Image: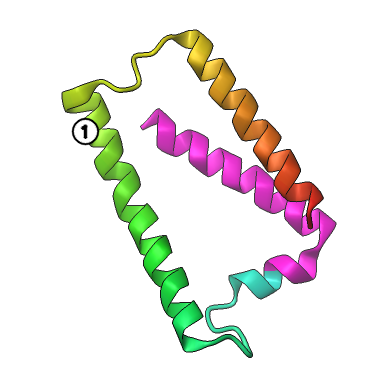
Amino acid sequence: MVLLHNIFIHYLISTIIQYNLNPQLVIQRLKRKREGSKTWDEFLVRISNLTIIIAIPIIAGLDSGRYNWSCLGLNYVWIGLLLAILSTIFYLTTL
């Protein structure tokens, strides 16, 4: 459950920063049907979003219940958090 909260907070903060940098881009990305986009592109976006929505709870359930993949230690948590912050900064600077 903590993973889902962290993902939500990460995307919330990223969306707020993106909106402050370029509000038109965020508005365009939130539209359900984009003008000029191809059908296959819309299909791939929907499938990838659906896969992520389904895959995250399944992987988290397997992790906490059966395989315990995330029992690596606190030093790996800090490295992962640092990499997530750096990737977000890199992504936001490309806008």
Which residue is pictured at 42% across the width and 78% down the height? 43
Q: Nearer the viewer, residue 53 or 90?
A: 90
Assess whether residue 11 is covered by the magenta stretch. Answer: yes
Q: Which residue bears the numbered disc 1? A: 62
Question: Residue at image x 30%, y 43%?
Answer: 57
Residue 39 x, y percent position in the rendering = 47, 87
Q: Quadrant of the N terminus?
A: top left
| Image side of residue 42 versus residue 16, left or right | left
* Image: 27 above or below 49: below
Location of residue 22 in the rendering, given as x and y in whole percent from the top left corner: 81, 62
Q: Residue at x 71, y 48 (%)?
A: 91
Task: Give the answer, above or below, for where 25 lies relative to 3.
Answer: below
Instruction: Please provide the residue range marked out in magenta.
Output: 1-26
Q: Residue at x 77, y 71 (%)?
A: 24
Q: Position of residue 27 (x, y in %)?
A: 69, 71
- Displayed quadrant of residue 40: bottom left
